[in-house]
Structures are given as structure tokens and as C-alpha cells.
Image (cartoon, helix red, strand yellow):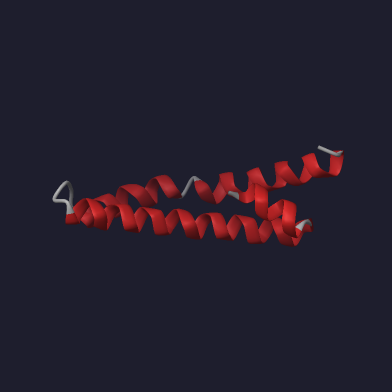
Amino acid sequence: MPRPLVERIGGSKGIWIASIATCIVGAAVIYAGAYGAEALGIADAKTEIDRGINAWKIMLLVAPASAMHRRRQIARGG
């Protein structure tokens, strides 16, 4: 997800905005999935949110790294 935002916004501001947007969308997907699973009777929402947030914490590192990588590619002409 960071790629299109970095390409459109550019600069360090683009990296920040792309990273924050990616983390927000990721959290929204976790909550929607957890409550959807609970509505279907598959799992408990609280348990699934806890599991999802533990995995989401990796996004706090991956999203900025991905955005910076794309910014470097753009700077090289790619």
C-alpha cells in the first residue's frame, strides 16, 4: 500500500503519510475481520483482535521500510 502514496506525494512527507495510512488500514482490517468472525460464530472477537494486533505490530517496522525503499527506487529513476 505505501507504493502509490509515495509515488504521488513524494519526499519524506510521503513516507510518513504512506506509513501511517498503511498502519490504519491494517488495524481496520483486523477489527473488521475479528468482528466478522464473531458474527459468523467462528471465533471470539477479543481473541482474534489480540492475535491480529500482535501480528500488526510488525507493520510498524515494515510499512516505513517499504515506503523508504520505494522512495529510493524513485530517486534512482525506477
Image quarter of residue 12: bottom right
Q: Residue at x 49, y 45 (%)?
A: 58
Q: Position of residue 2 (x, y in %)?
A: 62, 50
Q: Residue at x 73, y 62 (%)?
A: 13
Q: Position of residue 9 (x, y in %)?
A: 74, 59
Q: Nearer the viewer, residue 63 or 10?
A: 10
Q: Quadrant of the C terminus?
A: top right
In the image, 27: left or right of 11?
left
Image quarter of residue 66: top right
Q: How many marks?
A: 0
Q: Nearer the viewer, residue 51 or 6?
A: 6
Q: Position of residue 40 (x, y in %)?
A: 17, 51
Q: Nearer the viewer, residue 51 or 70?
A: 70
In the image, 78: left or right of 28?
right
Q: Position of residue 8 (x, y in %)?
A: 73, 56
User: Most extreme residue toward the left, as rendered?
Assistant: 41
